[in-house]
Image (cartoon, coloured by chain):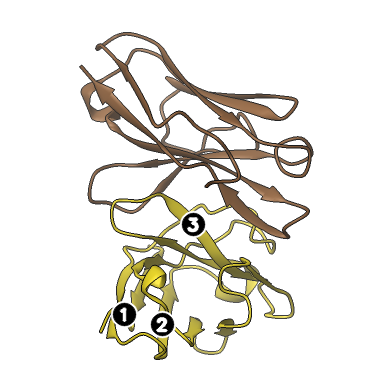
Amino acid sequence: EMQLVESGGGLVQPGGSLRLSCAASGFTFSNYAMSWVRQAPGKGLEWVSGISGSGGSTYYADSVKGRFTISRDNSKNTLYLQMNSLRAEDTAVYYCPKAPTDKPYYFDYWGQGTLVTVSS
Amino acid sequence: QSVLTQPPSASGTPGQRVTISCSGSSSNIGINHVYWYQQLPGTAPKLLIYRNNQRPSGVPDRFSGSKSGTSASLAISGLRSEDEADYYCAAWDDSLSGVVFGGGTKLTVL
């Protein structure tokens, strides 16, 4: 059974850093692109970043470019999001959906998300 | 402000047919496929329609998608109470090199 389990969320002060993880199981992780998508409280979905199956190609939303870094360790079946210089507007539930291809164009499976709260 | 534009709300009575529109531009919907996601209250999103009009296994044929030019729409026929959810359209944007979402449409079944 396919599973995506996000972790690493929590409360962090503005300007601080946090690293999210997404543990994948039930499929050949390295074959598929992955993304991070967030949802602020009571708001809609916002794509944050994507990465190809090999990790050789990465993509970022303008809102996080230069502050967030996506990476993956295919030997550990784990996706990461390093978040630096956090702002209040980064507060959201962060999901790590899987793409059905090597391009992060769309998402066929989602985890349950992890909540990041940026506040002093 | 979302790159793709959806109406914030839609409603219908059980058994009715409702449609939700999604408007984009030449850099996203105009040249790429459209996807639709359903988010039931308190849950993660779920893929509903892919490549404009394809349904993943397990999605009822009451749900259908279409695309024309820089716009797309999701139709739900035979509306049921369990269809009450938020619906999002999405597409890859070549200019932004990223996925763009609509703002979401909250569907209420009266």
Element type at marker 3? strand
Q: Where residue A28 appears, x then y in whole percent?
A: 56, 71
**Residue appearing at x 74%, y 41% in the figure:** B32
Report in which chain the residue with disc 3 lies: A
- Look at the image and tell me whether residue B50 can be seen: no
Residue closest to the eye, B30 or A73: B30
When asked about the image quadrant of residue A30, the answer is bottom right
The quadrant of the image that shows the N terminus of chain A is: bottom left
Q: From the viewer's perspective, is A33 left or right of B61?
A: right
**Residue A46 has which mark?**
3
In primary-sequence order, the first of circles 3 and 1 is: 1
Q: Are marks 1 and 2 in contact (CB under 8 Å)?
A: yes
Q: Colour of chain A?
A: yellow
Q: Which residue bears the numbered disc 1? A: A9
Label 1 and label 2: CA atoms lie apart by 6 Å
Question: A14 above or below A65?
Answer: below
Residue kind at label 3, given as amino acid type: Glu
* Residues behind callouts 3 and 1 on a single chain: yes
Report in which chain the residue with disc 2 lies: A
Q: Colour of chain B?
A: brown
Question: B106 above or below B80?
Answer: below
Label 3 and label 2: CA atoms lie apart by 16 Å
Q: Where residue B40 appears, x then y in whole percent?
A: 28, 42
